[in-house]
Amino acid sequence: MNNLLHPDVTASSSMKFGLLAEEHHFASHSAPPSIWPDFLTGQAEQPVRVLLVDDDPHIRRVIAQELLADMRINLLAEANSMKEGRRLISVHEFDVMLVDLNLGDGTGFDLIEHMKTVRPVAEAVVISAMEDEQHALHAFELGATGYLVKNSWFGNFSQAVLQVVNGGASITPNLARRLLSKFNHAQESNHRILYKSSDKGKLSEREKEVLKLVASGYTSLEIGSRLTISGLTVNTHIKNIYRKLQVRTRAQAVSFAAHRGLF
């Protein structure tokens, strides 16, 4: 995680900030965090406005206390249900909504979707007890920019709010690792499918010759002249190449073949 957005600043980091203060016009405050760049959103005089929606009163109280302790954040209101969350969205101008997925009378997904309709500029961060890839992906599809697992994120909710409001994203590290792994597996599967499809339609030697000349910029007539075949035959070869490589243009055919070492 980006230490710049963490409320605790180490001694070495403080020295670095001090050296850069004049250049970047850092804003200094008398209470923690002691140093906060004034070019980032979230200042004592203009804190980030937050709504908190969670039906667990204990969890909501813990998160609320953490947010209230940070001078860069203004916790506007709290809700314990889908219905109350919708009401708060309609009556408050806010920057970030922290929302649980299970709200008793509805889901956090529904509330994120509603929020993006009413307040499209606001950011949504899921706070959940479930470290589940499918739930996270669905939340991101609906427009969320963060997904935090409660038990592993206490002490960092302020950091998450500041990250998303300054253009970043916030996600529990273990979940992020699992999503990356899932993405990599999906890419490998797609590559295997592509290779299988290309194996089924291997280019003939003549088609490879034609494609090499296409890659060199020759027209169909010029290719025909060099290979002593008609331009019509050349175009037939090119159509067959398109079909076998599953592409639609000469540029795509050349790029596909080059990346897969077909010539």
Image (cartoon, rainbow, N blue to C red):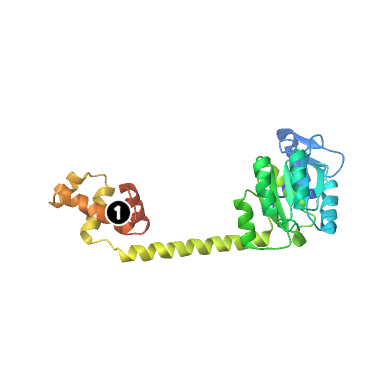
Residue 182: x and y, percent?
A: 56, 63
**Does residue 15 show up?**
no
- Which residue does the image show at 43% across and 62% down from the upper left? 191
- Which residue does the image show at 23% across and 45% down from the upper left? 218
| Between 239 and 106, the one nearer to me in the picture | 106
**Does residue 187 show up?**
yes
- Which residue does the image show at 67% across and 62% down from the upper left? 174
Q: At numbered mark 1, what does the secondary structure look like: helix, strand or loop?
A: helix
Residue 237: x and y, percent?
A: 22, 54
- Which residue does the image show at 76% across and 40% down from the upper left? 48
Q: Is residue 97 left or right of residue 68?
A: left
Please identify the quarter of the rendering in which residue 88 is found: top right
| Between 137 and 214, the one nearer to me in the picture | 137
Residue 254: x and y, percent?
A: 32, 51
Q: Residues within 10 Å of mark 1 (few under 14, many from 20)?
A: some
Residue 226: x and y, percent?
A: 15, 49
Q: Is residue 257 left or right of residue 108?
A: left
| Between 97 and 253, the one nearer to me in the picture | 97
Q: Quadrant of the C terminus?
A: bottom left
Q: Is residue 21 left or right of residue 180?
A: right
Which residue carries the number 1 mark?
A: 242
**Label 1 sits on what residue type?**
Tyr
Please identify the quarter of the rendering in which residue 44 is found: top right
